[in-house]
Amino acid sequence: MVLFKPIKTSRASEDVFVQLKTSILSGTFKSGSKLPSERELTEMFEVSRGVIREAIRMLELSGFLSIRQGHGGGAYVTDLTLSHVSNAFLDLFQTNTLSMAEVAQVRMFIEPEVARLAAINFTPAHAQQIDEAEAREHGTYQSLTDQIACLTTVHKVLANICGNQFFEAIVRSMLKITAEMVQKVVPDPYALHGPGEHIQLIKAVKAGDGPKAEAEMHRHLKDFMISMVKLEKEYRQQMKAQP
């Protein structure tokens, strides 16, 4: 049985949240496992059910738990993946905590380095992966979402090839934020980014030329991110207008 410390402070739900979160991160409660019942947690922490419910709700909103109803229902530990990072940054952007100018600054700093590392780590085994990503840009799109996904696949592939999972998580987070804004305020993504714009970048990566790949990524992103920063005002206005 897991032993928790009884809660005696006025911020009881936050303290319960921290202890449960620590237990999940340490592996005491593994992915897919069910937390003890509300009654059991109430007894362990020596708090009210309301406190437990609030802590569980905080864990659910943070992506650590999913709540299942019906027979066998309860609070289950989710499969923690890097996608949680992307969702968290998107939430910060949507609530105007992060600005597009800040996202642009980080993209201009990190993605050229990601391209350089991808060139250094590139092997013949990666060729098909990156060629297929480039080919997707020239295909037929099923929707605006699909079009944006196809035009950004090369960035995701390079982030994967670079060999740093943290860089990959950051790149995917920034791409998710960019996609959110493009979908809201750019009817035709081709106005910002057409197919085939990654060709020189891909050539540099395939050649194993790190400095060239870094320079090509910087060149590719520069005008695009300037346009995105200018579009943020329109995005914020549209978000305010939503019911």
Image (tube, grey):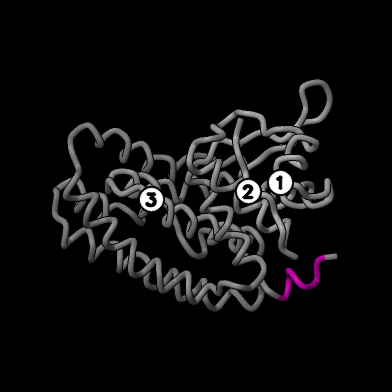
**For the residues bearing labels 3 and 2, Cβ distance under 8 angstroms:** no
Disc 1 from disc 2: Cα separation: 6 Å
Secondary structure under tag 3 reads helix
Q: Which residue: 66% across, 48% down?
A: 59
Q: Residues within 10 Å of mark 3 (few under 14, many from 20)?
A: many
**For the residues bearing labels 1 and 2, Cβ distance under 8 angstroms:** yes
Dot 1 or dot 2: first in sequence order is 2
- Write down the residue under mark 2: 5
- Write down the residue under mark 3: 168
- Residue in front for this viewpoint, 220 or 97: 97
The dot on residue 45 is 1
Q: Which residue: 58% across, 53% down?
A: 87
The location of residue 117, given as percent across then percent down, is: 22, 53
- Asked if 189 appears above or below 47 in the picture, the reply is below
Amino acid of disc 3: Glu
Disc 3 from disc 1: Cα separation: 38 Å
> Which quarter of the figure has residue 206?
top left
